[in-house]
Protein backbone atom coordinates (compact mmCIF):
# COMPACT_ATOMS: atom_id res chain seq x y z
CA UNK A 1 0.00 0.00 0.00
CA UNK A 2 2.79 2.40 0.86
CA UNK A 3 4.22 1.83 -2.62
CA UNK A 4 0.94 2.91 -4.23
CA UNK A 5 0.78 6.04 -2.08
CA UNK A 6 4.41 6.82 -2.86
CA UNK A 7 3.64 6.45 -6.58
CA UNK A 8 0.67 8.82 -6.24
CA UNK A 9 2.93 11.34 -4.48
CA UNK A 10 5.50 11.01 -7.24
CA UNK A 11 2.88 11.52 -9.97
CA UNK A 12 1.44 14.49 -8.10
CA UNK A 13 4.88 16.09 -7.79
CA UNK A 14 5.86 15.47 -11.42
CA UNK A 15 2.47 16.48 -12.85
CA UNK A 16 0.91 19.22 -10.67
CA UNK A 17 -2.01 19.59 -13.10
CA UNK A 18 -2.84 15.88 -12.98
CA UNK A 19 -6.37 15.10 -11.83
CA UNK A 20 -6.85 11.96 -9.77
CA UNK A 21 -10.40 10.84 -10.48
CA UNK A 22 -10.63 7.56 -8.58
CA UNK A 23 -8.68 6.81 -5.44
CA UNK A 24 -11.35 5.12 -3.34
CA UNK A 25 -10.11 1.68 -4.33
CA UNK A 26 -6.96 2.36 -2.29
CA UNK A 27 -9.00 2.01 0.89
CA UNK A 28 -8.74 -1.74 1.15
CA UNK A 29 -8.31 -4.29 3.91
CA UNK A 30 -4.52 -3.89 3.95
CA UNK A 31 -4.70 -0.12 4.39
CA UNK A 32 -7.42 -0.26 7.06
CA UNK A 33 -5.55 -2.98 8.94
CA UNK A 34 -2.41 -0.83 8.86
CA UNK A 35 -4.44 2.15 10.13
CA UNK A 36 -5.80 -0.05 12.94
CA UNK A 37 -2.31 -1.18 13.99
CA UNK A 38 -1.03 2.41 14.11
CA UNK A 39 -4.13 3.83 15.81
CA UNK A 40 -3.68 5.08 19.38
CA UNK A 41 -5.76 2.81 21.60
CA UNK A 42 -5.78 5.19 24.56
CA UNK A 43 -8.08 7.80 23.03
CA UNK A 44 -11.63 8.38 24.23
CA UNK A 45 -14.38 6.31 22.62
CA UNK A 46 -17.21 7.65 20.50
CA UNK A 47 -20.94 7.31 21.05
CA UNK A 48 -20.87 3.59 20.24
CA UNK A 49 -18.40 2.90 23.09
CA UNK A 50 -16.16 0.68 20.92
CA UNK A 51 -12.44 0.72 21.80
CA UNK A 52 -9.51 -0.28 19.61
CA UNK A 53 -9.18 -3.50 21.59
CA UNK A 54 -12.85 -4.40 21.15
CA UNK A 55 -12.75 -3.61 17.43
CA UNK A 56 -9.61 -5.72 17.06
CA UNK A 57 -11.21 -8.82 18.58
CA UNK A 58 -13.13 -9.38 15.34
CA UNK A 59 -10.84 -7.34 13.13
CA UNK A 60 -11.20 -9.48 9.99
CA UNK A 61 -15.01 -9.45 10.09
CA UNK A 62 -15.19 -5.78 11.05
CA UNK A 63 -12.88 -4.71 8.22
CA UNK A 64 -14.70 -6.89 5.67
CA UNK A 65 -18.03 -5.32 6.68
CA UNK A 66 -16.53 -1.82 6.58
CA UNK A 67 -15.01 -2.37 3.14
CA UNK A 68 -18.29 -3.79 1.85
CA UNK A 69 -20.22 -0.74 3.08
CA UNK A 70 -17.63 1.59 1.52
CA UNK A 71 -17.87 -0.24 -1.81
CA UNK A 72 -21.67 -0.13 -1.76
CA UNK A 73 -21.49 3.55 -0.80
CA UNK A 74 -23.73 2.80 2.16
CA UNK A 75 -21.16 3.76 4.81
CA UNK A 76 -22.45 6.47 7.08
CA UNK A 77 -20.29 7.91 9.86
CA UNK A 78 -21.87 7.96 13.29
CA UNK A 79 -22.47 11.26 15.05
CA UNK A 80 -19.53 12.56 17.03
CA UNK A 81 -19.67 12.80 20.81
CA UNK A 82 -19.18 16.45 21.80
CA UNK A 83 -17.15 17.15 24.93
CA UNK A 84 -16.21 20.51 26.38
CA UNK A 85 -12.63 20.76 27.62
CA UNK A 86 -11.26 23.64 29.71
CA UNK A 87 -8.83 26.15 28.21
CA UNK A 88 -6.07 27.98 30.10
CA UNK A 89 -8.12 31.19 30.12
CA UNK A 90 -11.00 29.50 32.00
CA UNK A 91 -13.26 29.15 28.96
CA UNK A 92 -14.31 25.86 27.41
CA UNK A 93 -13.41 24.44 24.00
CA UNK A 94 -15.59 21.94 22.14
CA UNK A 95 -13.96 18.65 21.17
CA UNK A 96 -15.55 16.09 18.84
CA UNK A 97 -14.86 12.45 19.65
CA UNK A 98 -15.48 10.09 16.76
CA UNK A 99 -16.30 6.39 16.78
CA UNK A 100 -13.37 4.05 16.24
CA UNK A 101 -14.47 2.87 12.80
CA UNK A 102 -14.93 6.46 11.66
CA UNK A 103 -11.39 7.21 12.85
CA UNK A 104 -10.10 4.34 10.70
CA UNK A 105 -11.81 5.70 7.59
CA UNK A 106 -10.62 9.23 8.37
CA UNK A 107 -7.03 8.01 8.73
CA UNK A 108 -7.19 6.12 5.43
CA UNK A 109 -8.56 9.21 3.68
CA UNK A 110 -5.89 11.39 5.31
CA UNK A 111 -3.15 9.15 3.95
CA UNK A 112 -4.56 9.29 0.42
CA UNK A 113 -5.16 13.05 0.44
CA UNK A 114 -1.70 13.64 1.89
CA UNK A 115 -0.14 11.56 -0.89
CA UNK A 116 -1.94 13.66 -3.51
CA UNK A 117 -1.54 17.15 -2.09
CA UNK A 118 1.62 17.17 0.05
CA UNK A 119 3.97 17.35 -3.00
CA UNK A 120 2.17 20.50 -4.19
CA UNK A 121 2.97 22.56 -1.08
CA UNK A 122 5.98 24.81 -0.75
CA UNK A 123 8.40 23.97 2.02
CA UNK A 124 7.51 27.27 3.72
CA UNK A 125 3.86 26.26 4.12
CA UNK A 126 3.59 24.97 7.68
CA UNK A 127 -0.06 24.72 8.68
CA UNK A 128 -1.58 21.27 9.34
CA UNK A 129 1.18 19.37 7.56
CA UNK A 130 3.26 16.40 8.70
CA UNK A 131 6.19 17.33 10.93
CA UNK A 132 5.36 21.01 10.69
CA UNK A 133 3.48 23.55 12.73
CA UNK A 134 3.55 27.07 14.11
CA UNK A 135 6.60 26.47 16.33
CA UNK A 136 8.63 25.22 13.38
CA UNK A 137 7.49 28.23 11.33
CA UNK A 138 8.66 30.61 14.06
CA UNK A 139 12.04 28.85 14.27
CA UNK A 140 12.39 29.10 10.50
CA UNK A 141 11.59 32.84 10.63
CA UNK A 142 14.12 33.37 13.43
CA UNK A 143 16.86 31.61 11.45
CA UNK A 144 16.16 33.75 8.36
CA UNK A 145 16.14 36.96 10.43
CA UNK A 146 19.49 36.16 12.06
CA UNK A 147 21.23 36.59 8.69
CA UNK A 148 19.56 39.96 8.01
Image (cartoon, rainbow, N blue to C red):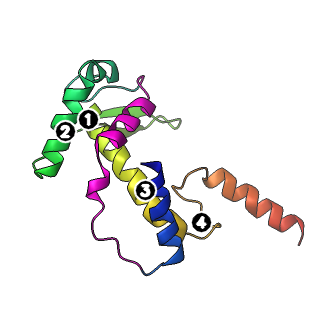
Q: Residue at x 10, y 50 (%)?
A: 72
Q: Does the magenta-highlighted stretch encompass residue 36?
A: yes
Label 1: element kind: helix
In the drawing, does residue 85 fall left or right of residue 22? right
Q: Residue at x 64, y 66 (%)?
A: 123
Label 3: element kind: helix
Say which residue label 4 marks: 125
Q: Decide: marks 2, 3 in contact (CB < 8 A)? A: no
- Circle nearer the N terminus (2, 4): 2
- Circle nearer the N terminus (3, 1): 3
Residue 61 position within the rendered picture, expressed as x and y whole percent measured from the top left: 19, 28
- Circle nearer the N terminus (2, 3): 3
Give me the C-alpha separation between circle 3 and circle 4: 25 Å
Say which residue label 3 marks: 4
Magenta span covers which residues?
Answer: 18-42
Say which residue label 2 marks: 66
- Whether residue 94 can be seen here: yes
Circle 4 Cα neighbour tier, 10 Å, few/some/many (<14 / 14–19 / ≥20): few
Q: Does the magenta-highlighted stretch encompass residue 22?
A: yes
Give me the C-alpha separation between circle 2 and circle 4: 35 Å
Give whichever of 80, 89 is nearer the camera: 80
- Circle nearer the N terminus (2, 1): 2
Say which residue label 1 marks: 101
Q: Decide: marks 1, 4 in contact (CB < 8 A)? A: no
In the drawing, does residue 146 fall left or right of residue 39? right
Give me the C-alpha separation between circle 2 and circle 3: 21 Å
Amino acid sequence: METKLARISQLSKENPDMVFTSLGHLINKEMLENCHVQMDGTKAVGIDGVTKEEYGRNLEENLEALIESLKKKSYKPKPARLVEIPKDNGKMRPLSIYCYEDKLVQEALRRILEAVFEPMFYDEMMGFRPNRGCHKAIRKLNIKNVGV
